[in-house]
Image (spheres, grey):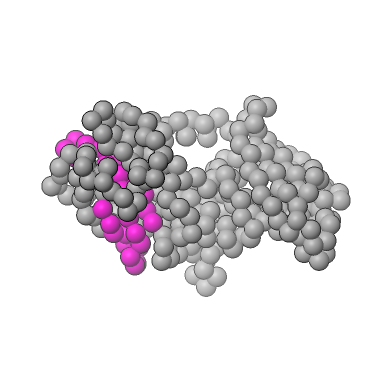
Amino acid sequence: MKTKNIFKTLAAAMLMPAMLLTTACSSEDDFAGNENTENVAKKGYTLPVTVNVTRQGDDATTRAAFNGETKKLEFTAGDKLFVSGGNATAGSFAGTLDYVSDGTFSGSVTTENKYTGTVDDLFASAYAYLLPNGYADYGYLSISGSGYSAYHGFDMTKAFALTKAAAVEQFSQEMAYGYSSGFALEPNNAILNFTISGLAASAEVAVVFTIYDYGEIYATITGNVTTDASGTATFAIGVEDGTELKDCTLTVGGNAITLVSSSKEVAAGKIYNINRSAATSLSPTP
C-alpha cells in the first residue's frame, strides 16, 4: 500500500464533519434511513432535499464498462447516496437519498440546527458516497446533547464478488466532496477480475487476498468460490486506488498464486483481468 493512500484516507477522515464530537454506537436506531427515527426526530431537524449527481470519467478508457452498449456505469433503481457534512447555520448534517431518475437523488437529511438556506450553500462542504443497489447502508448518524456524529462505514475498496459483472455493478465505490449544482462522483477503487485454472473440478475453494503495508498486514479479503467442471475459479475483488499488486498475496484453495513479478499499481475506475494457473502461477503480469 502506497503511503499516499494512507494520507488520502486520513485526509478524508479529517474532512468528515468536524463535528465528529462523539462516537455513535452502531445500534439499529442510529442507522441513517432506518424507519425508527425517534432518536433523530427528537434531536435533529429533517430537511427534504433533491440533488443532481453525475459521474466523472464515464468512458471506456477510464471507467469499468457496465452497460455494454454505452460503455458506462449507470445508476439503477435501488441506488442510494449518503451525504454528510457541515454548515455554519445548519451545523452538522447527514442523510441517505434514494435514486429517482436521470441522475437525480431525493430524500432528506437531518441537520443539527434549523436551516432555511439553499441546498447549494448547505452542501458546499459535504461528502457524497454512492451506495449501489444490493448493498446495505452502513452510514449512521446520532445527534445528542453531547454532540453530533455522522459516519459512513460503507467500503467496497476491500470486497469480494463471484463475478466481474457483480463487481462492476456493486463495487463501484464513488464519492464527491463539495457541491456545485450537483455532486460530481469520482471512482475510488479498482476491480481485480480473476480467472484461476488448475484447481480441483467442481469444488468449493477458499480465496484469501492479503494486502501488506511496510511488511504488516493492511487488509485481508476472503471469500469462497466453486470451480467449474474444468477446475477453473472466477471471482472479483475490489481494492483501493494505488494498491501495489507486488505488496499483495493471493491463495486459492490453498495454492499460492503469483500475482506479478514486478511493480503494478492499480488505478481507480479500472478493471484488471488477471488469469493465472494454480499449477504454475507463472502467467504474465496483467
Q: Position of residue 263 (x, y in %)?
A: 69, 39
* Residue 83 falls within the magenta-colored stretch: yes
The extreme left residue here reads: 116
Residue sitting at x 77%, y 64%: 228
Q: Is residue 46 left or right of residue 163?
A: left
Residue sitting at x 46%, y 57%: 132
What secondary structure characterizes most of the magenta part? strand
Asked whether residue 163 is in view, the answer is yes
Q: Position of residue 88 (x, y in %)?
A: 19, 35
Up/down of 204 relative to 100, above or below: above
Is 55 or 233 nearer to us in this picture?
233
Q: Which residues are magenta?
A: 80-108
Occupied quadrant, residue 78: bottom left
Up/down of 284 relative to 7, above or below: below
Q: Position of residue 183 (x, y in %)?
A: 33, 52
- Tag count in the figure? 0
Up/down of 153 relative to 196, above or below: above
Occupied quadrant, residue 123: top left
Residue sitting at x 82%, y 50%: 278
Q: Is residue 155 left or right of residue 25?
A: right
The extreme right residue here reads: 279
In which quadrant of the rendered image does the N terminus lie? top right
Residue sitting at x 45%, y 31%: 10
